[in-house]
Amino acid sequence: MSSRNGALLLVEDNPDDAELAIDALEGAKLLNRIVRAHDGEEALRYLFQAPLHPLPVVVLLDLKMPKVNGLDVLKRIRSENRTRSLPVVILTSSKEDRDIRACYDLGVNSYIVKPVDFEQFVSCVKQLGLYWVVLNTVPPV
């Protein structure tokens, strides 16, 4: 079903949320490989350290993580020419106005508050995957 072959980078420290998100993305029948980073530091290594991986189609990024938080990951993504236009979606439990404002000020493409309900969470992640992989058009590399 996928129109673009790149991976989806899921940056999530909570193992339960990560498993649910991966199951939902796989349930959406996307052909894209799902790469999971367990924290912001691992995400930055994947995106910036040699050997460089091809850029993912989209980054699904949690905010509240150990080592390097999501805001710092987003800052780094937006500060580098190679990753500046990479779609980044914040997928977090934070509803705080300051977090939402900070993310948009840094150029996030979308900010989604994780639904608490299991079925709503799965549906939300499926829809995110379908939109960013199948429907969204990104600038050429």
Image (tube, grey):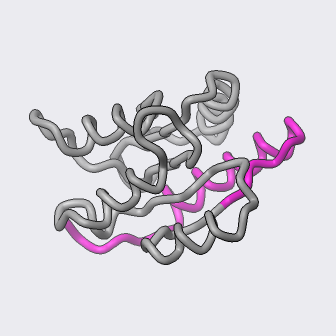
Query: Is residue 28 rendered to the left or right of residue 42?
Result: right
Image height of 110 relative to 25, above or below? below
The foreground one among 65 and 2 is: 65
The foreground one among 37 and 98 is: 98
Where residue 97 appears, x then y in whole percent?
70, 70
Q: Residue furthest left?
A: 50
Residue 119 in the magenta stretch? The answer is: yes
Where residue 119 appears, x then y in whole percent?
86, 39
- Total labels: the figure holds 0
Residue 75 in the magenta stretch? The answer is: no
Where residue 37 appears, x then y in whole percent?
42, 31
- Residue 80 falls in which quadrant of the image? bottom left
Residue pictured at 68% horizontal, 54% vertical: 127
> Is residue 36 in view from this perspective?
no
The quadrant of the picture occupied by the C terminus is: bottom left
Image height of 15 relative to 37, above or below? above
The foreground one among 19 and 32 is: 19
- Magenta residue span: 112-141
